[in-house]
Image: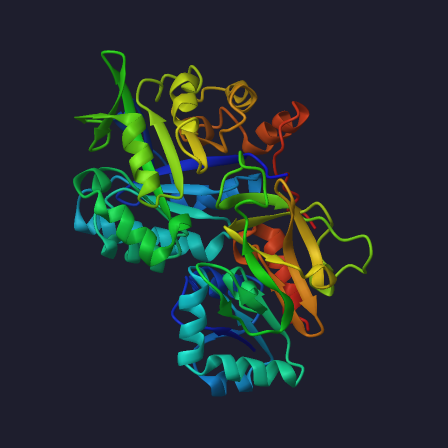
Amino acid sequence: MITKRIIPCLDVRNGRVVKGTNFENLGDVNDPVALASYYSAAGADELVFYDITASAEGRALFTDILKKTAETIFIPLTVGGGINTIDDFDRALKCGADKVSVNSGAIRNPDLICEAAKKYGDQCVVISADVKRVDGRFTVFAKGGRENTGMEAISWIKRCVDNGAGEVVLNSIDSDGVKNGFDLEMLDAVCNAVGVPVIASGGAGKAEDFITLFRTLPKVDAGLAASIFHFGEVNIGELKKLLAANGINVRQVNEER
Amino acid sequence: MTAIVDYGVGNLFSLKSSFAAIGAEAVVTNDPEAIAASERIILPGVGAFEDAAKKLRDAGLDRAILGETEKGKPLLGICLGMQMLFEKSYEYGEHAGLGLIQGSVKPMLGVIPAELKIPHIGWNPLIFPKNREKSALYRYIDEGDCVYFVHSYYGADCDDAVTAWAEYGALLTASVERGNVFGTQFHPEKSGSVGLRILKAFTEF
């Protein structure tokens, strides 16, 4: 039986991990490599590194951090942020990333997913979608949630999967940072539309939110969160024990052997 | 010294780093002489079977690998590298593999229940077959330990060689073994400390 994945997301700017509420008021939290090792030892099933740097210097720092992380920990790494070209894919993969997630880059150039899937395989390409309800309609936002594309989200995600995206990260802007649970309605709509793994993002405020997520929507493959892990509100090891106690299949880690 | 065969498919960064992490010497190489000089060989790989098999042949590395394994040198195929050990693959047509493990590589589609997702991505516990001794590759891990999979095709008709299964709507081949030839469908270099312990066991062959 495949296990449900718990994925901490590390937003990195200028070499440091940050996390804000509703994508604003970013605050410095911790050192990315140290945080990544800590999560890996605690039982994180995968890590997402999201580069929110705008400058070339910041990008170089990010690449350096990615490399150091990939040399230190041996669980799957996904990289996102600033992925606009095949060269960006190449750069991330050469530094030890296993998957690359595209968001605005795919909105600007929908062929990017096709090209990348052809070159690196579907399993390597993740479509990350920032989605918000606008007049009751699931709508795709670009540029870190700042720009309304006007596109309907479900058909957009479906199109990305048809083009070769092997996984979907669905980030609900409506729930992000609110800590009131995952956006089950939005997730359900996406799960019913695509046949690839779906990762829930945005809204986790406590361990119970993950139980509700996997119980209500067995089709969801993974839960992703940032601040609740960074600030120690939820401990990954304890979260996994709690999930197991609630009949949800998770990978238990026993590092001391 | 372990030779990690570089034939232009897939990402060898993590594999190389994981050898460093367990304190084992490894070299990433496309040189048949370096493969001949090594103590053991890792055949990695991600992507499409046909393309990978062609690249391996074009570089003359298939002959180097076959020659060395015939002499008894340990070989570990990982993911697509494991699939390449088989006689053939039915991924987009029919393509010949190295023929070191009897059986063929088939699509999961139609074999697992339709509601399960393909590719199979994620962590599964290993299930050891009841009718054979635990593989030496697993000497430092236990049945039920989880490893990380990413694949859409699987090793079929190879029950005699299977040393572990993964349950994903059906029992899928997680690893195979025949003499000095080993293969894992999962990625030990992405399977945390469990994976590192599997690689450590391999470096002791």
Given residues B177 and B158, the one toward you in this image is B158
Picture coordinates of residue A172 (x, y %)? 34, 23
Quarter location, residue B67: bottom right
Given residues B198 and B130, the one toward you in this image is B130
- Residue B23 in sight in this render: no
- Residue B181 in sight in this render: yes
Given residues A38 and A50, the one toward you in this image is A50
Residue A38, placed above or below residue A22:
below
Furthest residue in direction front, as rendered: B93
Picture coordinates of residue B27 (x, y %)? 48, 75
Q: Please name the colour scheme applied to the rendered image.
A: rainbow
Identify which residue is drawn at 48% across, 88% down: B33
Identify which residue is drawn at 43% across, 26% down: A192
Residue A203 shown left or right of residue A136 in the figure: right
Residue A105, placed above or below residue B24:
above
Identify which residue is drawn at 23% across, 44% down: A82
- Picture quarter with the N terminus of chain A: top right
Quarter location, residue B197: bottom right
Give the tally of numbered discs.
0
Quarter location, residue A43: top right
